[in-house]
Amino acid sequence: MAGYVLKCRKCGREYGGDYRLFRCLCGGVLEVVLDLSGFRGLTHEGNLGVFRYSPLLPSISRQITLGEGLTPTLRLSSGGVEILFKLEYLNPTGSFKDRGSALSISKALELGVSEVLEDSSGNTGISIAAYAGRAGVKASVYVPSDIPLGKYLLIRAFGANVIKAGSRDDASRRVLDDLTESKYYIGHTWNPYFIEGTKTIAFEVYEFLGEVDYVILPVASGTLLLGLWKGFNELLSLGLINEVPKLIAVQACGYDSLSKYLSDVVRTECSESTSLADAIRLTNAPRLPYMAEAISRSGGRLVVINDHHIISAVKELFSLGFAVEPTSAAAYAAFKLIKGELSGKVLIPLTGSGLKYVGGYDSPLYKVFMGES
């Protein structure tokens, strides 16, 4: 594992690995800056999960893993474009968030934390609850009041305390109101170690697929987008790839928070806010300017998708055998909208499992397949 410092994106102040606050003293977002001068190879074959890539991860003494990562990729040709579906919904708790949870819970354990707080639409809460349970750490998760029942029950099943707090944005505010000195805020919207976990997707893409031309992905808090941006740029700095892929961010109607930062936006008709893409219903993410910077510098753009397009994409993906949640399908819907402008290899991470929605009459998938949306 590599030596590192935490650096503020706002003021440039640096902190050591023993820093316990979730943001800089100036209020800015922190990121991990690795010392890669001693880099000798991408993998450490004796390690499990995302720690397989420990040479490009911050040095952490405790490693909590549930075997996340190394997800399969399936290929599909469409109009001369090669789609690479990376099945991130096959991670241990059913989403890519397990990669970030492995790093952030491992760091919390190293810091001697006994209780963590998280705010989440569902997937991260499930993941943090599971990894905290594995580590023997107490977890409290703040969620929107209309969280899908399946996600709510899974967070509870993994042993976390669940607090319903209005909208998704309300949950992110409420968790900070309840924060005390004895409770460690592990929230993925701020946590720099979470992004260190999600960047391992870029390493797997390089190791097993080589270079890709585009990545199309759903965006809310930006942990996936910024993880990919960071991972591909680290590979570029090491001379392992020639170019960072163009990042196509996908947001849903009513929650297109990136629109005010970007000029290159493709937008479907938005007559109402999404009721389906629950995993990306967030508007106050602290890293929004840095997401926009990554998209622009990569040569990417923003696509805003409505529920009509999401429904069509969900049905098509299920017909292909992919049991995904509507938020994952939003990325495929965006691909279908702009595919005439694309060429080469297009990576689409299928980020979350649709199996978390099965069984509830208020489930987004019930509405899709029973024709109520």
Image (tube, rainbow, N blue to C red):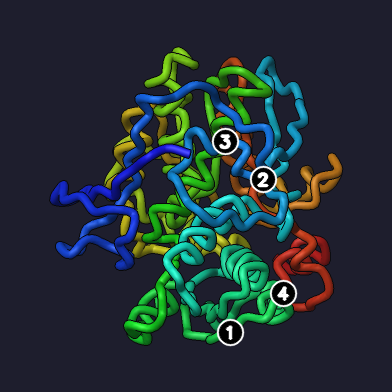
Amino acid at circle 3: Tyr
Question: Where 295 sits versus 171, above or below?
Answer: above
Q: Residue at x 58, y 54 (%)?
A: 63
Q: Residue at x 32, y 52 (%)?
A: 288
Secondary structure at badge 1 equals strand
| Of pointers 4 and 3, the one earlier in the residue sequence | 3
What residue did someone put label 2 on?
Answer: 49
- Tag in front: 1 or 2: 2
Q: Residue at x 62, y 55 (%)?
A: 98
The extreme front residue here reads 61
What whole-number distance in Å separates the C-alpha atoms at marks 4 and 3? Answer: 29 Å
| Of pointers 2 and 4, the one earlier in the residue sequence | 2
Who is closer to the viewer here, 297 or 176?
Answer: 176
Place of residue 158 in the rendered image (x, y in percent of width and height, measured from the top left): 70, 76
Mark 1 vs 2: CB contact within 8 A: no
What whole-number distance in Å separates the C-alpha atoms at marks 1 and 4? Answer: 10 Å
Who is closer to the viewer here, 195 or 64?
Answer: 64
What whole-number distance in Å separates the C-alpha atoms at marks 3 and 1? Answer: 32 Å
Report the side of 38 relative to 162 (left or right): left
| Of pointers 1 and 2, the one earlier in the residue sequence | 2
Q: Which mark is residue 154?
A: 4
Amino acid at circle 4: Leu
Who is closer to the viewer here, 10 or 185?
Answer: 185
What residue did someone put label 1 on?
Answer: 162
Place of residue 155 in the rendered image (x, y in percent of width and height, measured from the top left): 66, 76
Report the side of 166 relative to 348 (left or right): left
Amino acid at circle 1: Val
